[in-house]
Image: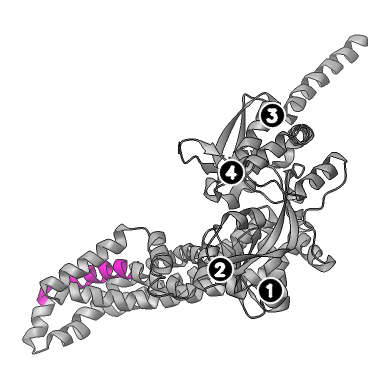
Amino acid sequence: MCRIVLSGFLLLSSLAAPAAAQRLPSGTELRWAGDPEGGAPYVQASPSDPSTLEGFDVEIADLVARHLGRTQRFVFVAFAQIDQSVARGDADIGLSGIEDTPSRRASMAVTIPYYEFREVLIVREADRSRLRTLADLSGRRVGTLGGTIAYEILLRAGARRGFQAVSYEDDVHPFTDLALGRLDAVLLDNVIANRRTVPGLAIQPASVAVGHYVGVLAPRDGPLRDTIDEALRAAMRDGRLERIFRKWNVWNEDQPGLHARVLGGVAVPPVSGLNEDEEEEIGGAGKSRWDATRRYLPSLLEAAGVTLLLSCLSMAAAVGLGVLVASGRVYGHRSVRFALVCYVELMRGTPLLLQLFVIYYGLAAAIRLPAFAAALVGLALNYAAYESEIYRGALESVSTGQLEAARTLGLTERQVLTLVRGPQAFRLALAPMTNDFVALLKDSSLVSVLTVVELTKQTQIFAANLGSWVIPGALCASLYLAMSLPLAAVARRLERRWKAASL
């Protein structure tokens, strides 16, 4: 009987030991995820040696790794995807100016706050006395970085106070657009605002809200998070954390109070400084994924409408321009054909994303197009090049015999094109045109770099605030299918009808 009990105890011990070992991931490296595009003072490539990184989050990662007896290894992850990447195991921890939010606390293992920041309003110097708070921005455009507390604040406050929240994928172009007059204000944390010293802009002294930077780990890595918290508390006690922040010129009067609260065991809320209703709204994303879905669904539907409208207008312009380019290449003078070939190769040989940046930002000194207009022009010009090749190939596929017969009957070249060659070419081009329109629906996601909030961008914001891509991704895919499948069905029906008519 004793041997049976002992054997059972040993069996349970052998099963429990691996499970316990898995709770605190072991190894010689601490893999930490960040985005160098955010730049200093968080994470950036060293100006003296681009192969190395520097920034206060780099030094904090090294501090934590030393506490764990490991070496740090950086894993590049786009800022908006850090949570998801850490959750799936690509890195042990995410550190890149990541904000403490209720949704992160609900979906991730979050470290203690290690830095306190303030959301501040940046305006043009000429508007400094008029635009002091969010209440002064009715009817105006206010920009910020997407997927942040600032964007959530702007969405909620904008709905009540009548201003438009504009989302950006980086923290550089909001200030550029503010200086150019495309925005009336920018809301961002003081760390970013203080380092973006753009002439003619001013930071309002009153803060809109108070938040904190944290590290994020996968939910299963709670024990590792607890060990990292020990490292951060030790660095607060002995002054190492203060020395890091002073080195990067971000230490201020807010930090001693935060460190005192953390070391004293006082609970630190994710967001403070707002009224109770606003804090409840910002915190609502972490309560229930289904509640968050119901809250975001109208925004997704609105963004889907923007995607569909932009795609239809862009495709209509691309078809019209593509027909002209194709006709010019078939019938035009040699110089005209050469110029059109250069246009087609330029559009097909350079990335659409680069073309959008050039049209919206590069040409801003000469012409300041609104974001939607710039997106429409960029997509139309790019797809017109591809459409022209489809139409040119279709025009040249019509047999020479039919063309000669039409000319023998006395038809002019214009009549030959409109009555004989054009209709046949259109039938041949219909299938690839349909494919291009579906591709354009998807490529419209790139226009988010111009602050156009289309379906994919809104989904990305939803996923970042929810802490998961499962529900947002399924909704986004469903909406794209709802837009593209009817078009494909209409195209197939036309093809069958024309095929039956030709028999």
For label 3, the residue is 25
Q: Secondary structure at mark 3?
A: loop
Residue 357 rendering spot, x and y as whole percentages:
42, 63
Tag 3 and tag 4, C-beta contact below 8 Å = no
Residues packed near mark 4 inside 10 Å, few (<14), some (14 to 19) or many (20 plus):
many
Q: What is the span of residues highlighted in magenta in the rendered image?
A: 384-401
Q: Earlier in the sequence, mark 1 or mark 2?
A: 1
Q: Earlier in the sequence, mark 2 or mark 4?
A: 4
Residues packed near mark 3 inside 10 Å, few (<14), some (14 to 19) or many (20 plus):
few
In terms of image quadrants, where is residue 201? bottom right
Q: Secondary structure at mark 4?
A: strand
Report the residue at 70% width, 46% height from top: 251
The three-letter code of the residue at mark 4 reads: Gly
For label 1, the residue is 158
The circle drawn on residue 453 is 2
The circle drawn on residue 107 is none
